[in-house]
Image: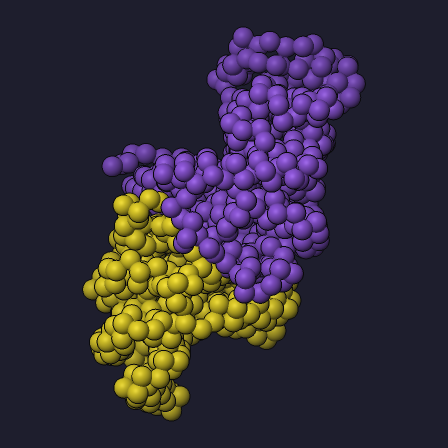
Chain colours: A purple, B yellow
């Protein structure tokens, strides 16, 4: 099997596959860990039971997602060596320490306090438990800091020198860490993680509101999630625009690919809305375009000249069709999120946030939108960097391990089978947990034994029905549900 | 001279990270290896709950070993990983199955629960065998040309690497059994005592077999261990193994719950020290030394600051997490 295949292409497929699966989990856990910290803080502050119910409800989901993130992440940390050994040898002195710091400052922090967060509420007391939750949340953010620094260095390398062995070495660590695209990418990704989580939380809240508008838990989580969408979606669009301008400055070829600008425009470039990039012909077929708008967005001037891929040697072209379309999918999702945020704000102002079934349906449909946007965004930025692993300096073809295609192909097949089997099961378990509404007296993972049969099996209907009536009562007494 | 010192310090740091991984994930992999011998659901719940709060931290040391090696010895990482390609992929897949089982087995419906129990046991076996085989493959030597691995993708598979694979299964199982002695009560503990006896003898046999086979791999290993004056430094290792064994047998006979686990760890310390004696100063035996593989000094120093401050902190809060969940695990007070 795989005799005669291109080993580098197989290694790329494997990295893309394992990375795409992995990124979904941290994108969710970064946001969810912060959300859990907020819920626990609100519970400690206000003493309202609904917050601890929501905390325990999402904690069970967090435990499943986090486990999947850990195991798929271990794969990533070894894949640099197994499939990209030349890359590891050459860039190890620079990005290796960044990843080592990620392990030391983030992974251990998360893992060390996770056990207490999941199972220790009764053992350590409320305040110390909150510290544990906070440490896990901070750990996820520190992790994002380092890994995005490493990734950004591959996109916009800075502060480096080359040694006699052909390795990149650090000349200035601050310039390595705070390389030109890093601040933009960090903001864009962390906001993306928060939005992704907000959309999932909002979708689960909306799903239960569609069944019963009086449940306290779903009302609170839906309201909180819609606030996030309302506030963060516009900020994210601005952050994305700024990130794009930074990319134009440091990786102009990636912007050409994202925009489908095969041709240079001396007198204002159009914005190509849609079309089919034809890589061999070097033009966009069936293009629907707005004249001069491209220059307006990228250069903030209608007539500014913009260079196209015709100024770049063909061997340095990224795969334009993928970059072009994944970018459009991401942007489309971003505007749908903005729409959801604005619509929810309108309904909130009108006082019908919990009654508008159309809004709830929209929110349910938008549940996966964050994941789609994150994946599309990553595909945009990673394919836009091609054909380099370190932009402009180290080619992808020169980064791979000296492995025969059958070795890489077999492991790819193994990962595909295992990931679909294992993570599909995990997603089903998560959806099952989400399908039951949070109820008063919700227990975290630590006290699942007595309530295990409730909430995860169809037989849970009985207990859920009981839960709904008391939840409605709780909602009535709560009154102040936002 | 400065560079020499830092590379040596880093060799010890990586060795320390890998060792902490081996002792910490070793016992929870060992629990997975022993899982088929504990078919009762109640026992399995207790076994899982005895490590559920800490397994994730245990595996983080593996990430530090891999990530730290890429950072401190990128050439060794770049040569070893392709050389160990198949065992590494197998290990990663094994760790996936057993890692998700910790949560999944509580989330599935009763009738299907067994599926994740099989994943937990099978994944633990696979990951352990793969780690042991990888160790054997490194010891027997790796074909290097220039800065690349130059062998095939089945080179790792030899009788010696299979021996080390099985030896590690036995060793982790011993750690798992003595962990159960430490953390459980009643019939479960009685059974763990019985297993500890058999596994201790199997472990001693494994240590003996690997120790006898290793000097035949390379003349350098034999010289390192048996040539004068090295023998002054190497002879205490087998003597210490004998002493720890006697203490371990006594603690098993007297049924002192708290001791067998730590004495088994001591056996691991000694075996690991023996490995270090065989390998040093090579990081890829007989071809790449720690100095040849070392990152530039400024990379190693940059990380040294982090390690010096953070590792003690990490050990501190990890110890706290173990302390929070100390004592015997009782079926009714399950974390899950």
**Toward the viewer: A40 or A306?**
A40
User: Residue A42's spot in the image, x, y percent?
Assistant: 68, 48
Q: Is residue B153 left or right of residue A183?
A: left
User: Residue B276's spot in the image, x, y percent?
Assistant: 40, 75
**Toward the viewer: B91 or A474?**
A474
> Is residue A325 shown to the viewer in this render?
yes
User: Residue A377's spot in the image, x, y percent?
Assistant: 57, 31
User: Which residue is rendered at x = 50% and y = 40% of the image?
Assistant: A467
User: Which residue is rendered at x = 49% and y = 44% of the image?
Assistant: A61
User: Which residue is rendered at x = 67% and y = 23% of the image?
Assistant: A352
Query: Please, is residue A301 above or below residue B294 in the view?
Result: above
Query: Please, is residue A327 above or below residue A48 in the view?
Result: above
> Is residue A177 shown to the viewer in this render?
no
**Toward the viewer: A209 or A112?**
A209
Q: Examine the image and state in which quarter residue B78 appears.
A: bottom left
Check the picture and name the quadrant holding the C terminus of chain A: top right
Q: Is residue B179 left or right of residue A23?
A: left
User: Residue A260's spot in the image, x, y percent?
Assistant: 59, 19
Q: Examine the image and state in which quarter residue A106 appears.
A: bottom right
Check the picture and name the quadrant holding the N terminus of chain A: top left
Q: How many marks?
A: 0
**Toward the viewer: A211 or A21?**
A211
User: Which residue is rendered at x = 32% and y = 77% of the image?
Assistant: B221
């Amino acid at each position: 099997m795989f005799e005669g295949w291109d080993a580098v292409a197989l290694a790329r497929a494997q990295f893309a596959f394992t990375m795409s699966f992995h990124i979904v989990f941290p994108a969710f856990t970064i946001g969810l860990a912060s959300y859990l910290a907020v819920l626990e803080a609100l519970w400690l502050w206000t003493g309202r039971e609904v917050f601890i119910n929501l905390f325990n409800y999402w904690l069970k989901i967090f435990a499943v997602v986090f486990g999947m993130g850990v195991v798929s992440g271990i794969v990533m940390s070894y894949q640099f060596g197994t499939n990209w050994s030349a890359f590891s040898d050459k860039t190890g002195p620079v990005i290796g320490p960044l990843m080592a710091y990620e392990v030391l400052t983030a992974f251990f922090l998360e893992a060390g306090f996770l056990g207490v967060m999941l199972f220790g509420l009764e053992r350590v007391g409320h305040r110390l438990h909150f510290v544990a939750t906070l440490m896990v949340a901070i750990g996820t953010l520190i992790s994002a800091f380092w890994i995005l620094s490493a990734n950004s260095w591959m996109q916009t390398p800075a502060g480096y020198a080359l040694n006699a062995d052909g390795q990149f070495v650090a000349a200035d660590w601050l310039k390595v860490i705070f390389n030109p695209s890093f601040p933009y990418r960090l903001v864009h990704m962390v906001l993306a993680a928060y939005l992704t989580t907000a959309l999932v939380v909002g979708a689960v809240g909306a799903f239960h509101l569609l069944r019963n508008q009086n449940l306290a838990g779903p009302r609170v989580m839906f309201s909180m999630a819609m606030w996030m969408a309302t506030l963060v979606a516009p900020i994210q669009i601005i952050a994305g625009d700024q990130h794009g301008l930074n990319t134009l400055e440091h990786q102009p070829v990636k912007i050409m690919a994202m925009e489908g600008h095969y041709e240079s425009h001396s007198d204002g470039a159009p914005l190509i809305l849609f079309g089919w990039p034809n890589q061999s012909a070097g033009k966009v077929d069936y293009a629907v375009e707005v004249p001069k708008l491209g220059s307006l967005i990228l250069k903030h001037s209608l007539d500014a000249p913009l260079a196209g891929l015709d100024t770049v040697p063909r061997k340095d072209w990224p795969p334009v069709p993928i970059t072009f379309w994944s970018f459009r999918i991401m942007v489309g999702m971003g505007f749908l999120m903005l729409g959801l945020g604005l619509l929810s704000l309108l309904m909130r102002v009108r006082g019908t946030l919990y009654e508008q079934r159309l809004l709830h349906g929209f929110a349910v449909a938008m549940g996966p939108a964050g994941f789609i946007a994150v994946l599309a965004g990553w595909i945009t930025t990673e394919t836009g960097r091609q054909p380099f692993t370190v932009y402009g300096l180290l080619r992808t073809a020169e980064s791979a391990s000296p492995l025969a295609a059958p070795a890489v192909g077999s492991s790819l097949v193994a990962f595909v089978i295992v990931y679909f089997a294992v993570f599909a099961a995990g997603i089903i378990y998560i959806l099952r947990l989400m399908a039951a509404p949070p109820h008063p007296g919700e227990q975290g993972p630590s006290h699942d034994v007595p309530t295990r049969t409730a909430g995860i099996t169809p037989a849970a209907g009985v207990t859920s029905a009981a839960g709904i009536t008391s939840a409605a009562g709780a909602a009535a007494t709560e009154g102040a549900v936002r | 001279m400065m560079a020499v010192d830092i590379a040596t310090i880093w060799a010890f740091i990586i060795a320390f990270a890998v060792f902490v991984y081996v002792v910490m994930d070793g016992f929870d992999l060992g629990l997975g290896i022993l899982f088929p011998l504990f078919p009762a659901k109640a026992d399995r719940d207790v076994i899982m709950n005895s490590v559920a709060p800490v397994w994730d931290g245990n595996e983080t040391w593996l990430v530090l070993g891999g990530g730290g090696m890429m950072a401190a010895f990128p050439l060794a990482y770049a040569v070893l990983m392709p050389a160990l390609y198949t065992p590494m992929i197998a290990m990663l897949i094994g760790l996936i199955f057993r890692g998700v089982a910790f949560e999944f087995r509580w989330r599935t419906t009763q009738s299907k629960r067994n599926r994740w129990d099989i994943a937990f046991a099978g994944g633990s076996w696979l990951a352990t065998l793969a780690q042991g085989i990888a160790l054997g493959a490194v010891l027997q030597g790796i074909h290097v040309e220039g800065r690349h691995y130059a062998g095939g993708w089945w080179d790792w598979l030899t009788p010696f690497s299979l021996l080390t694979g099985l030896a590690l299964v036995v060793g982790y199982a011993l750690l798992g059994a003595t962990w159960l002695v430490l953390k459980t009560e009643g019939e479960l503990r009685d059974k763990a005592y019985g297993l500890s006896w058999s596994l201790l003898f199997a472990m001693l046999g494994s240590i003996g077999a690997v120790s006898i086979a290793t000097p035949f791999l390379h003349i350098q290993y034999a010289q390192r261990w048996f040539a004068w004056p090295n023998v002054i430094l190497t002879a205490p290792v087998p003597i210490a193994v004998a002493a720890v064994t006697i203490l371990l047998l006594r603690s098993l006979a007297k049924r002192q719950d708290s001791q067998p686990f730590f004495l088994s760890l001591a056996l691991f310390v000694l075996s690991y020290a023996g490995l270090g004696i065989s390998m040093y100063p090579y990081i890829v035996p007989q071809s790449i030394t720690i100095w040849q593989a070392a990152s530039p000094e400024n990379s190693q120093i940059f990380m040294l600051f982090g390690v010096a401050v953070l590792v003690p902190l990490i050990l501190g809060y990890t110890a706290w997490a173990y302390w929070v969940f100390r004592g015997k695990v009782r079926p009714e007070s399950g974390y899950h």
